[in-house]
Image (spheres, helix red, strand yellow):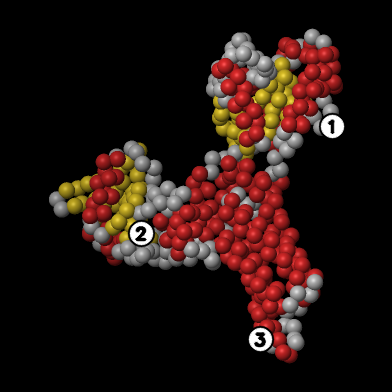
Amino acid sequence: MHNDTIVALATPSGSGAIAVIRLSGNDAIAIASKYFKSISGKKLSQQATHTIHLGHIIEGDKTIDEVLISIFKDPNSYTGENVIEISCHGSSYIQQEIIQLFLRHGCRMATAGEFTLRAFLNGKLDLSQAEAVADLISSDNEASHQIAMQQMRGGFSSEIAKLREELLNFASLIELELDFAEEDVEFADRTQFKQLIERINFVLKRLIDSFAVGNVIKNGIPVAIVGEPNVGKSTLLNALLNEDRAIVSEIAGTTRDTIEDEISIGGIGFRFIDTAGIRETEDVVESIGIKKTFEKIEQAQVVMFLIGSPQLIASKDAIDAFKIEIEKIKNKFPQKQLLVVLNKIDQITDSKLANITSTLESKSTQLIPISAKTGIGVEQLTNALLNLINTGALRNNETIVTNSRHYDALLKAFEEIQKVKHGLETGLSGDLLAIDIRQALYHFGEITGEITNDDLLGNIFANFCIGK
């Protein structure tokens, strides 16, 4: 049942300057008015929607706090119900006193995501917009924030809804043909229907392909920094993060475990993983670190292979050995983007650098010379990282899919559209075409929430924080 009144803390738990406590339900205003005494003497229940009132929360003779109360009357509120938001002082004690007061007098504690669930059930948001609320709260860089905002405003849902509506119109005409099967008439123009299916096919493929970009933007792009011991991997990590996150030492094998940290570059989140140096070793602890290095490379999307320039000065054989190592990484991890980074260029001459660069660089190998210690070339490296990620769709404000549930529904819808397309090409009968069209419509409806069930809603909103 969703006709009772719920209450929860809408701001993070703990002490702060202020806290916001939210009530939602038919009786929210009536319940709050019993325990609120306005400075102006006005009754809360008689005030207009979207107004703010100063006063005190009082229980009997006890004044709990001086607060500001905001009123939002249905249907013009976030949940579509009567909503009260109480801005109180941020003491944990005050927060709990106010919440407990309302729990004793007609409210129950909201479950995770219940305010947004009510917004969905009352038609204020569709399901994909509701899910975007959680993505917006968790966004920690410009790109993920931009995608979540676009989805919350209905960019994704409106695109899906338009396709679904057009497909539904043709489905209705084909279903109508079945009622006049004996007359052998066609209400649905097959040529126009083929054009629609081609258009739907194109849009679905674009949305499905966008998930590759959307997923990494949402979760951060993992970059493994690998190389032999003492080539400056930890120094580079510190330079990228602009802090001393990793231990730097002249002793080879200092990093014996992986170190991870995230930064935002050009609005995109990157998760850098500083790994143990790869070399033959009899040290048990160090060998465990090296094993973890290969595990982290498996998880990474980008591999940054770091070479220390002084290592290459000795001989041509040394350069050839690194060329072989680069090819090994390419062959072992063919699906991963590879950047070869030539570090410690401050320790060699320009002519030596030019010789090394011309020998190592190729059409398939991007070489970036840097000095992690002095910062030379680090900006060029961050630009190269950005160029590896296809953010054209993001720059053009196109719809980008980031939600795995949406991706799964799109794949299923695409599969059904392929069946419809094949049916049209082979002259399949209307009754069999209608079955595949209905299935495609079903998967479209799963995305926006036109088709749903309690288990699905439970799984989605369980991932929200309480109070949202």
Does residue 112 appear in this view?
yes
Height in image: 329 above or below 309?
below
Q: As displayed, is residue 231 above or below residue 402?
A: above
**Residue 179 marker:** 3
Report the amino acid beneath label 2: Ser
| Residue under numbered circle 1 | 363
Neighbour tally class for label 1: few under 14, some 14-19, many 20 plus, Cα within 10 Å: few
Picture coordinates of residue 251 (x, y %)? 61, 10
Taking the spot 25% from the left edge, 50% from the top edge, the residue there is 100
Q: Amino acid at mark 1?
A: Lys
Q: On the rendered structure, is 138 left or right of 180? A: left
User: Dot 1 lies on which element?
Assistant: loop
Assign a secondary structure to mark 3: helix
Q: Using the numbered discs, state the Cα–Cα distance from disc 2 to disc 1 in whole angstroms.
A: 61 Å
Classify mark 3: residues with Cα within 10 Å, few (<14), some (14-19) or many (20+): few
Identify the image quadrant of the N terminus: bottom left
Q: Residue at x 79, y 18 (%)?
A: 321
Q: Quadrant of residue 173?
A: bottom right
Going from N to C along the chain, the mark reached first, 3 or 1, is 3
Which residue in the structure is indicated by mark 2? 24
User: Is residue 62 or residue 114 the one in the foreground?
Assistant: 114
Q: Which percent across, then down, holds residue 140?
A: 54, 40
Question: Reading the chain from its start, which is encountered first: label 2 or label 3?
Answer: 2
Q: Position of residue 142 (x, y in %)?
A: 59, 42
Residue 204 is labelled as none
C-alpha gap between disc 3 and disc 1 = 63 Å
Residue type at numbered disc 3: Asp
Q: Earlier in the sequence, mark 2 or mark 1?
A: 2
Mark 3 or 1: in front is 3
